[in-house]
Image: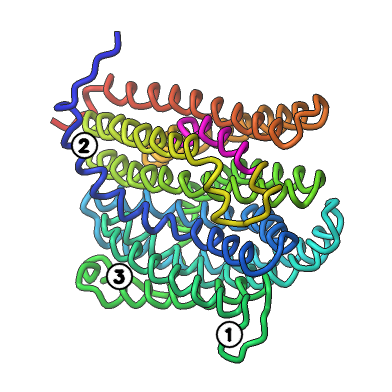
Amino acid sequence: MFTYSFAKYKSFYKDNLILALPIVGSQLGHTLVHMADGIIVGHFADTAQLAAVSLVNSLFMLVLVLGLGISYGLTPLIAQANGANNQAECGKLLSNSLLINFATSIVLFALVSVVEYKVIDHIGQSADVVAHAKPFLRLLGLSIFPLMLFQAFKQFTEGLGFTKQAMMISIWGNLINVLLGIVFVKGMFGIAPMGVTGVGLGTLIDRILMATAMGTYVFNSKNFKAYLVQFKLFSVDLSRIKKIIKLGAPVAMQYSFEISAFSGAGILIGTIGKVEQAAHFSALSLAAFTYMLASGIANAATIKTGNNFGAKNYKELRLSAIASYHIVIAFMSLTALIFVFANNYLPYIYTNDLKVIGIAAKLLLLAALFQLFDGTQVVGLGVLRGLGDVNMPTFITFLSYWIIGIPVGYVLGFQLGLGVDGIWYGLTFGLLAASILLFIRFQNRTKKLLENPIELKV
C-alpha cells in the first residue's frame, strides 16, 4: 500500500531544490537560445524563416546532444570523487574533459558541415526554407566549439555543488543573445537586416563570451583552488579519458535517441508543410522549456546520487532520489496545467500567423499530456547516471523512442491520417514507455544496494 510522509522527505526536498534551481537556470540557457531565435525570427521575419529555425533546430540538436551527453559524463565522476574526498582527482578529470570536449567539437562541426552540404537538400523540405536554413546552420556549427568548452567548466563546477555561477552566466548570455539577435535580424545601428542568419551570428558571439566567462571564473575562484592543484591543461590520461567517455558516450546516446525522435518528428512534419512545421516548432519549444526544468532537477539528482554513492550512504541515496521524483512531478503537473489553460495564447509568443497558432494550440494540449512522463523519465536517467548505470538506460531510451515512439507516430500520422497530431501521439507513447521502464530500473538498482548491509555506511 502506498504511504507518504512529508517529514520523511522534507530535508531532501530542501537540499535537492537548493542544488537544482541554479542548475535549472543554467540548463534553460540551451533552450532559451533556441526559443529566442524563434521568437525574434517569428516577429521580425516571416513564416518561411521561422520554419527554417525549426528545421535547423531539428537537425542541429541531433548533433549537439551528442556533445552535451559526452560532457555530462564528467559530472557523476566529479560528484563521486568529491563524495570520497578525493580533491586531486577532480582537477585531473577536468583536464581530460577539456581535451575530450575540444576533440568532440571538431567531430561535431564536421557532422554539421555534412548535414549542410549533403543532407539538407534531400529531405523533402521547402526550397525557400532550406535557403534560409543553410547559413544559420553553419553559424550554429561554429558555436559548438565555445559551447563545449563552457560545458566542461559547467559540469565540473556543478559536480562540486557550485551551481549559481553557471546560471548567472547563462542568464546574462541569453540577454546578450536576444539583444544581438534583434539588432542583426531587424537591422539596426547601420547594420543591414540579416534575417535568420542574424540570430545565428548572435548565438555564436554569445557562446564565445559565455565560455570565456566560465573559464575565468573556474581558474580565479578560491572555491576551486584545492581541486586544481594537479590540473594541467595538456595532461592526457587515457584511463580518465576512458572513464569519462564510458559514462558520457551512453549518456550522449540517451539524449540522442530522445532528441532525434523529436527532430525526426519535425522532419516528418516538414514534409506535410511549412505551416505545420512552424507550429511544431512553436509548441515543441515551449515543451522543451519545461523539459529543461526537469533536466535541471535530473542533473541535481545525478550529483546527489553520485555524492551518496561515493560515500556509500545508500539509504540517503534512495530517499534523495525519490524526493527528486516528487519534485519533478510537482513541477511538470504545474506546467501541464499552464499548457491546458493557456494553449490558445502561448503560440503568440512566436508568431501572429493564425494558421500556425491554431495547429500549435492543439499540439500544446498533447504536450500537457506528456509532461509527467517527460519529467519522470529524465529524472530516472539522472539518478541512474549518478550510480554509473548508463548502458541499460541507453537501451531503454532507444526502445522507447525508436521502436515505439516514431513508428507509432508514423502509423498514426500518415497511415491513419491523423497528421501532426498522430506524430505527437507517438512521441507521447514513447515517453510513457521510457518513464515506466526507467522507474523499474531505478527501483531494482537502489533496492539491491539496500539489501547488502555490508556495503551500507553505518
Q: CA distance from mark 3 to mark 1?
A: 48 Å
Q: Which amino acid type is shown beneath numbered disc 3?
A: Gln
Callout 1 secondary element: loop
Tag 2–tag 3 contact (CB < 8 Å): no
Q: Which residue is mark 2?
A: 12
| Residue 357 seen by the camera | yes
Residue name at image x 19 percent, y 22 percent = 5
> How busy is the neighbourhood of tag 3: few (under 14 within 10 Å), some, or many (20 plus)?
some
Residue name at image x 31 percent, y 48 percent = 20
Q: Is residue 202 left or right of residue 134?
A: left
The vertical placement of 201 against 291, above or below, is below
Q: Is residue 400 left or right of residue 391?
A: right
Mark before the other along the chain sequence, 2 or 3: 2
Foreground label between 2 and 3: 2
Q: Which amino acid type is shown beneath numbered disc 1?
A: Met
The vertical placement of 385 against 174, above or below, is above
> How busy is the neighbourhood of tag 1: few (under 14 within 10 Å), some, or many (20 plus)?
few
Along the line of sight, which residue is nearer the eye, 224 or 92? 224
- Chain part drawn in magenta: 359-375
On residue 188, which mark appears?
1
Q: Any magenta on residue 437?
A: no
Mark before the other along the chain sequence, 3 or 1: 1
Residue 309, position in %: x, y? 29, 39
Q: Any magenta on residue 364?
A: yes
Callout 2 secondary element: helix
Q: Which amino acid type is shown beneath numbered disc 2?
A: Phe
> How busy is the neighbourhood of tag 2: few (under 14 within 10 Å), some, or many (20 plus)?
many
Quarter that holds the N terminus: top left
Q: Which residue is mark 3?
A: 230
Q: Is residue 144 left or right of residue 82?
A: right
Along the line of sight, which residue is nearer the eye, 201 or 100? 201
